[in-house]
Amino acid sequence: MSSLETPTPMPTRSLLPNKPGETGPRSISLDVFLNIIDMLVEMAQEEAKPNKFWVDYTPNNKGSVSLRGRDNSFSLDKGKWSIFQKQRFFSIRLPLQVCTNARRVVHIKFLRFQAFETYSQDLIDVWILPEVDYFCLSLCNPDINLTEALSNYHANAALQQSHRSHYILNQLQKVQLYCPHLLVQGTNYVSSLMALPSLTEIVILHTESSDVLRMHDFKPFQAGVIDIPDKLTNLLMLRAEHGTNFEAFWAPFKAKGVRLLGRLSSATDIVLEVVSTREGVRMQWLPHVLDGDMVGLPF
């Protein structure tokens, strides 16, 4: 081509005209669009603060398993769970408003339920993240038959016939127990949790409500599996109760990949993991404790 010839312009990708009121090219593929929505949903999930829910059980009642919100979600500002629910909804509101396909992407991670308000019988819509949220069980309360219901889960016709109850129990991954000596009182309480198909964590408390423990009380933190410190009285009781049999007791949970974790109190972060050994119950501090990341912990 000589220097006097006009170069042929490169072909450009034609864009479909926009409808009135619309902006941007309409030629973007659905796959690309949904990938963008998926990234927005993942960001919302990563930034979500854990919520706590009570799991209530009413025998012989239609939809016998229900959820109830709990205050004091695990965060520095100690806001009510309903505030975190509003924040959670705002984080996914845009994808929910776009189209049906975008809503489907949201519903893969954020599960929509109805739950009772903390101090009333009012039902509200909530968005649950099974990988993030904690579900509190009152298994040690003799007036609540949830233990028996879970123990006979697969033979319990009422639970199996209630789609809502069945669906709720299938979503529980992280369970928090509010009975301090639950693991000491009897194996039936904890064994009943094996009925939960998605269970990954059991969180227990290690101090009585009247005790105040701070992380400073346990310094210096030793890495690896260690013996139970004297101040963790509930763990000491657990060790004394099971002795060297704890490894066999915990074996079904270990095979399922379930971890037994602990907090110093209901309002603090998880700081330790209970470990089963041939010698009995031991524990180890979690990495963020060893690294000195004490944000949100009583120090």
Image (tube, rainbow, N blue to C red):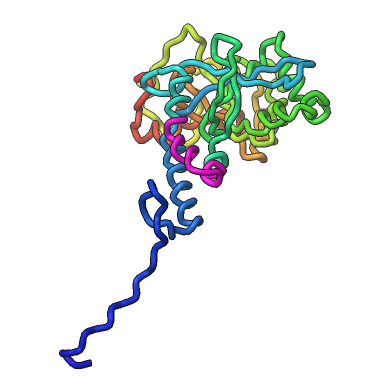
> How far across and down, in percent of the image, does residue 256 sit?
66, 39
When asked about the image quadrant of residue 57, the answer is top right
| Residue in front for this viewpoint, 78 or 254 | 78
Q: Is residue 179 visible?
A: yes
Left or right of residue 222, residue 279 in this image: right
Left or right of residue 38, residue 294 in this image: left
Vertical position of residue 12 compared to residue 223: above or below: below
| Residue in front for this viewpoint, 141 or 277 | 141
> How far across and down, in percent of the image, does residue 170 sit?
67, 33
Quadrant (top left/top right/bottom left/bottom right) for the C terminus: top left
Vertical position of residue 23 compared to residue 71: above or below: below
> How far across and down, in percent of the image, does residue 283 sit?
52, 30
Q: Residue 197 lies in magenta, yes or no? A: no
Q: Residue at x 60, y 15 (%)?
A: 179
Vertical position of residue 75 compared to residue 13: above or below: above
Left or right of residue 164, residue 118 in this image: left
Q: Which residues are magenta?
A: 89-105
> How far across and down, in percent of the image, does residue 250 sit?
66, 32
Quadrant (top left/top right/bottom left/bottom right) for the N terminus: bottom left
| Residue in front for this viewpoint, 196 or 45 | 45
| Residue in front for this viewpoint, 263 or 89 | 89
When asked about the image quadrant of residue 239, the answer is top right
Q: Is residue 249 visible?
A: no
Q: Residue at x 45, y 17 (%)?
A: 80
Q: Residue at x 47, y 30 (%)?
A: 89
Q: Residue 94 lies in magenta, yes or no? A: yes
Magenta residues: mostly which secondary structure?
helix
Query: Seen from this angle, which residue lies furthest top?
Result: 210
Query: Seen from this angle, which residue lies furthest front?
Result: 20
When asked about the image quadrant of residue 104, the answer is top right
Query: Seen from this angle, which residue lies furthest bottom?
Result: 2
